[in-house]
Amino acid sequence: MSSAVEAAAEILDQRPDAVYVHPQWLASGLLRVARERGVAVPGDLVVSVGVDSHLARTSEPSLTAIDLDPTRTAREAVDLLLHRIRGGAPGRPRLIPSTLRPRASSVRSEETA
């Protein structure tokens, strides 16, 4: 058994209401173990992941995720790096907003709540 599946089994043994998974690839193991145990997502367990990605969007169920805006983050990082390379003073920290992307893994209907 893989360590991801073992970790998922240990987590589900505790019967949590919700799980935040990071790194996101561990979510596949969690969803697999949940299915094997008859734990309904999102009926019995809400699942969210730390990065919005193709995996989050195409999982079954699709996974609620945090969109960290990687394109903007990379652009800001390159700008700061180039500024320093050109002899500029260290810049102030920049805050890049993130967005929660609710999906099927965390949306409970009244019947499943």
Image (cartoon, rainbow, N blue to C red):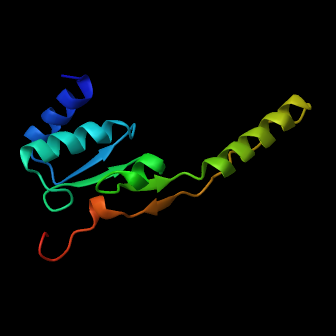
Q: Is residue 73 above or below residue 26?
A: below
Q: Is residue 62 above or below residue 74?
A: below
- Quadrant hosting residue 108: bottom left
- Total numbered labels: 0
Q: From where the camera sits, is residue 51 visible?
A: no
Write the residue at 32% across / 36% down: 26
Q: From where the camera sits, is residue 96 visible?
A: yes
Write the residue at 11% across / 42% down: 36
Work out which residue is located at the far right of the displayed protein and give it.
86
Q: Would you say 83 lies left or right of 28 here? A: right
Write the residue at 27% across / 52% down: 47
Depth check: give the residue in front, 24 or 54: 54
Whole-percent x and y of residue 111? 11, 75
Whole-percent x and y of residue 44? 13, 58
Work out which quarter of the rendered image holds the N terminus and state it: top left
Whole-percent x and y of residue 97? 58, 58
Q: Would you say 99 lies left or right of 14 here? A: right
- Quadrant hosting residue 28: top left
- Quadrant hosting residue 10: top left
Depth check: give the residue in front, 23 or 98: 23
Whole-percent x and y of residue 72? 68, 51
Write the residue at 59% across / 53% down: 69
Work out which quarter of the rendered image holds the C terminus and state it: bottom left
